[in-house]
Amino acid sequence: MNKTQFVSRLAEKTKLTKAEAERALNGVVEIITEQLKGGDKVNLTGFGSFSVGERAPRTGRNPQTGQPIDIPAARVPKFKAGKILKDSVS
């Protein structure tokens, strides 16, 4: 499902117009992004939680030359599914 399809389904479920549904979705994504940038966690009970993890620096290999390359440390977003979501797809 892409964003356009998601917005259409959201509009159907919520009885919003597609424009309103897209603004709502964009707002949710923006809030989650802002919280993660600030180092906070977002917990949507039953659905899951979004957080930021730290990836340690490591050495990799250039696939074209085979030469080692240094990959710097990075902050990465994480999502952990909640119990209700896990149970519903089992």
Image (cartoon, rainbow, N blue to C red):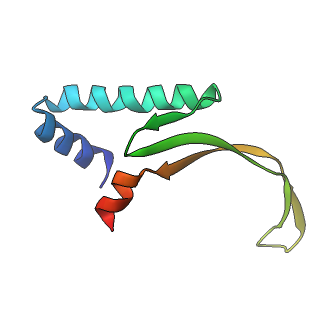
Q: Is residue 41 left or right of residue 23?
A: right
Marks counted in the figure total: 0
Left or right: residue 72 compared with residue 48: right
Q: Quadrant of the C terminus?
A: bottom left
How far from the left and from the top, in percent, is residue 52?
63, 40
- Residue at left offset 14%, top offset 34%: 14
**Residue 22 position by quadrant:** top left
Using the image, determine if residue 38 lies above or below residue 1: above
Q: Is residue 11 above or below residue 78?
A: above
Vertical order, 23 against 79 (above or below): above
Residue 16 picture quarter: top left
The residue positioned 42% from the left and 33% from the top of the image is: 29
Quadrant of the drawing holding the N terminus: bottom left
Q: Nearer the viewer, residue 60 or 38?
A: 38
Residue under the point 52% across and 31% down: 33
Taking 77 as reference, is 66 left or right? right
Using the image as rendered, state which of residue 10 and residue 86 is in the foreground.
86
Looking at the picture, how far across and down is residue 35, in whole percent?
55, 27
| Residue found 52% across the figure and 48% down from its top | 79
Residue 77 x/y as whole percent:
60, 44
